[in-house]
Structures are given as structure tokens and as C-alpha cells.
Amino acid sequence: MLTAVLCLIACQLIGELVREAFHLPIPGPVIGMFLLAAALALRGGRADGAIPPFLEKVAETLIGHMGLLFIPAGVGVIAEAGLLRQQWLPIVAALLGSTFLSLAVTGLAMHWLTRSSGRQERGDLSLAKHPRGRS
């Protein structure tokens, strides 16, 4: 488990360094997790997509305790209750707008992916029924 925790911390550190070096508006841990995902996707010769067992165990443990990880965010919301009361309209508009936008993008991506995968599955069958040159 220590190796996996050190791997996660190293990815977070690299993400922070990348953020600082390029002055990016994205949090360092997010960049680090993208780098970790890319490293797992591109690691040498592993096409099965399996996560290394040492990393999987730590990830499952963290997911199991995810509720505890939201406590600091909840405390921050309570601490800023006065600001939330003053600025509730732009906050609600941003929440609704971002929710609608993410639903629309997810729906369009799923539509595009299922259409393209459906074409690949039907590829040979549709060509056999309708050879080129005939209508």
C-alpha cells in the first residue's frame, strides 16, 4: 500500500509542478490524476486495461472513505454561509448552467460514441447487403 500512496502523492506533486510551471488555472491534483490515468493507459504492452493490484487496493480504500473526504468542503460551505446568502442568484445560475452543460455534453458524447460503435459492429453486414455501386 505504501508504494501506491507514494505513487498518488508523486502524481499530485508532479501536477502541482506542472501547474506552477505553466501557470495553469487547473488544480495540481487534477493534473496529477490526468497524468496518472495517461500513464496507466499508455503503459508498455498492457492492452487489457487492468489496474495494478497495489494501486487498485488503495483506490478502493479511498473510495470507501470518500464521505470523510467531503467534510472539509462542507465546513467551507458553512463557513461562507453569509456570502452564499448575498450571492445566491449567481451561484444558483452557475449550478444550473453547469449542470445543463455537462448533461448536454455527456449526452452528445454518448450519442456520438454509440453511433460510431454501432457502425463498426454493423460494418461488414451493411456492406454485404448493399455493395458499393448499387443503391
Image: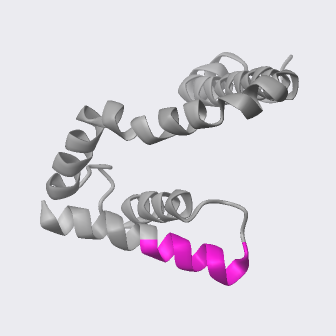
Main secondary structure type of the part rendered in magenta? helix
Q: Is residue 110 left or right of residue 73?
A: right
Count of marks, rendered view: 0
Q: Residue at x 67, y 27 (%)?
A: 106
**Which image quarter: residue 90?**
top right
In percent of width and height, residue 89 lies at 86, 21
Q: Is residue 35 magenta?
A: no
Q: What's the magenta region?
A: 13-23
Seen in the picture, residue 116 relative to 20 is either above or below; the reply is above
Query: Residue drawn 50% across and 60% down?
Result: 29
Nearest the viewer among 77 and 28 is: 77
- The image position of residue 74, as x and y in percent, is 50, 32
Quarter the C terminus occupies:
top right
Position of 7 with respect to 78 (left or right) is left
Tell me if I can see residue 110 in this picture. yes
The colour scheme is one colour
Name the foreground residue: 93 vs 129: 93
Residue 55 versus residue 110: which sits nearer the camera? Answer: 55
Indicate yes or no whether the magenta region holds residue 22.
yes
Residue 111 image offset from top left, x and y in percent: 69, 22
Drawn side of residue 124 relative to residue 42, left or right:
right
Could you say which is closer to the camera, residue 99 or residue 43?
99
Residue shown at the point (29%, 68%) measured from the top left: 7
Task: Please tell me which residue is depicted at 41% across the width and 35% down the height of the picture.
Answer: 71
Q: Is residue 4 above or below residue 94?
A: below
Point out residue 134 in the picture as x, y percentages from the top left corner: 83, 21
Residue 37 placement: quadrant: bottom left
Residue occupying the far bottom of the picture: 21
Q: Quadrant of the N terminus?
A: bottom left
Quarter of the figure with residue 103: top right
